[in-house]
Image (cartoon, rainbow, N blue to C red):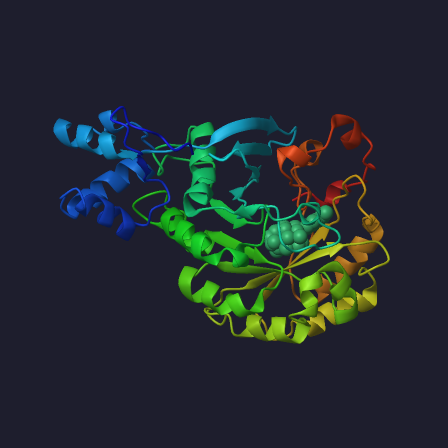
């Protein structure tokens, strides 16, 4: 979103990303009554309107008054790529020139938007492409909501209750560690889930964390969204290498925080993500240990075949190994656990996101090893 300036020279405040309470405060500073909040909210988040002049339920002078003080920002789309499998990846540019990626993944029964929470990441998980990029900064609430707004624009998905709307689910699984930016993420989720606006229910929103234990409870209490944990290993020795934050918050603490996650005993299952790395964490013994480790936690398991990137130090497990691992998980009662990589032709798969400044050249992309993908894994 660009900082816009009115012809009078006044800097305009962007309304996108403000919570309802914040919007009310802004409007009351103009002497407007509270019921205006609902009307304007409807235009912003139900209709997707960006021009005050078009907000026809408001009296004309009011529209003018709003336009003198406020703007309805949109992110600049630096690039849009569409994969052969229907996945779409956008590179969005923020007002300060920084960029982040957002991915849309269509499936039979849902359409999921994968949103970024930071530019880069402070953590350095050794299998993750984003982890090789240092943290530039947190995204603001407006920039997080802005990704959803821009995707809805691109998919012509207004009004927000449009029949067959393409985006039904949101995952905070893009760039960055959302629990290191929880204030802004929580605000953005409030806006996104508001049922008089974009109206994507909290039950259809999942936040993934590498395991920032001290923030997990607050996340559940303040946002009420589903939690996913980037587990990836069943021993501290291996997890210390793959997900170095484990040295600070080891497995026992992480799993306790999962047991204590608000709502978890109310049929709100926690998703455990597990990247399949050849000869590192993919043995049958590991699979059995995984089942033992999460015993008693209402859970789903998501096996993610490792998505390589140029220079990545690991290989993906063989399909047969993944199947055998999945067999143990399924026998323990967890259904369909393998996540099919989507949009790999446009580097949109898990862990492949990076900023444009560090983006891969086509030549590098083509050098990536092909990975066999048995059709029986396709859901
Ligand atoms: N920082 C958060 C949110 C990112 S979610 C977190 O780590 O949970 C992205 C998911 O993709 C995480 O589970 C991450 O561990 C996984 N991932 C990262 N790099 C990957 C790769 N190269 N292949 C497959 N999955 C990867
Ligand atoms: Fe950051 Fe998550 Fe990647 Fe780890 S896996 S480096 S926490 S984005």
Q: Judge whether 243 appears above or below 165 on screen.
A: below
Q: Position of residue 343 (x, y in %)?
A: 66, 35
- The N terminus lies in which quarter of the figure? top left
In depth, the one of 246 and 281 nearer the eye is 246
Q: Is residue 200 left or right of residue 240?
A: left
Q: Position of residue 121 (x, y in %)?
A: 62, 50
Looking at the rendering, which quadrant does residue 348 occupy? top right
Q: Is residue 161 left or right of residue 240?
A: left
Q: Position of residue 186 (x, y in %)?
A: 43, 55
Q: Judge whether 70 appears above or below 206 on screen.
A: above
Residue 155 visible in this rendered orientation of the protein: no
Q: Position of residue 315 (x, y in %)?
A: 83, 48
Q: Residue at x 83, y 32 (%)?
A: 367
The mark tally for this picture is 0
In depth, the one of 272 and 51 nearer the eye is 51
Residue farthest to the right, as pictured: 279
């Amino acid at each position: 979103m660009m900082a816009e300036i009115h012809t009078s020279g006044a800097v305009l405040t962007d309304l996108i990303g403000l919570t309802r309470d914040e919007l009310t405060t802004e409007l009351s500073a103009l002497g407007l009554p509270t019921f205006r909040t609902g009307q304007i909210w409807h235009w912003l988040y139900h209709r997707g309107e960006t021009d005050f002049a078009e907000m026809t339920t408001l009296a004309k002078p009011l529209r003018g008054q709003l336009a003198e003080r406020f703007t309805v920002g949109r992110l600049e789309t630096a690039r849009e790529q569409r994969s052969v499998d229907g996945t779409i990846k956008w590179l969005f540019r923020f007002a300060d020139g920084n960029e982040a990626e957002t991915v849309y993944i269509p499936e039979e029964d849902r359409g999921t938007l994968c949103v970024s929470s930071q530019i880069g990441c402070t953590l350095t998980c050794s299998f993750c492409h984003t982890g090789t990029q240092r943290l530039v900064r947190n995204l603001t609430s407006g920039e997080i909501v802005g990704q959803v707004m821009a995707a809805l624009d691109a998919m012509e998905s207004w009004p927000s209750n449009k029949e067959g709307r393409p985006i039904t689910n949101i995952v905070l699984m893009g760039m960055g560690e959302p629990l290191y930016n929880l204030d802004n993420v929580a605000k953005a989720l409030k806006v996104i889930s508001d049922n008089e606006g974009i109206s994507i229910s909290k039950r259809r929103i999942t936040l993934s964390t590498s395991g920032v234990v001290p923030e997990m409870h607050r996340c559940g209490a303040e946002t009420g969204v589903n939690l996913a944990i980037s587990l990836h290993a069943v021993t501290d020795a291996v997890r210390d290498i793959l997900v170095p934050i484990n040295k600070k918050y080891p497995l026992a603490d992480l799993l306790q925080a999962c047991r204590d996650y608000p709502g978890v005993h109310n049929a709100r299952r926690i998703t455990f993500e597990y990247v399949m790395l050849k000869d590192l964490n993919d043995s049958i013994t590991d699979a059995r240990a995984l089942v033992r480790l999460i015993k008693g936690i209402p859970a789903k398991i998501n096996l993610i075949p490792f998505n390589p990137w140029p220079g990545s130090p690991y290989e993906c497990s063989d399909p047969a190994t993944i199947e055998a691992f999945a067999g143990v998980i399924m026998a323990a009662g967890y259904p369909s656990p393998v996540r099919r990589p989507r949009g790999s032709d446009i580097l949109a798969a898990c862990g492949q996101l990076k900023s444009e400044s560090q983006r891969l050249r086509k030549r590098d992309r083509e050098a990536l090893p092909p990975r066999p993908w048995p059709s029986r894994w396709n859901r």
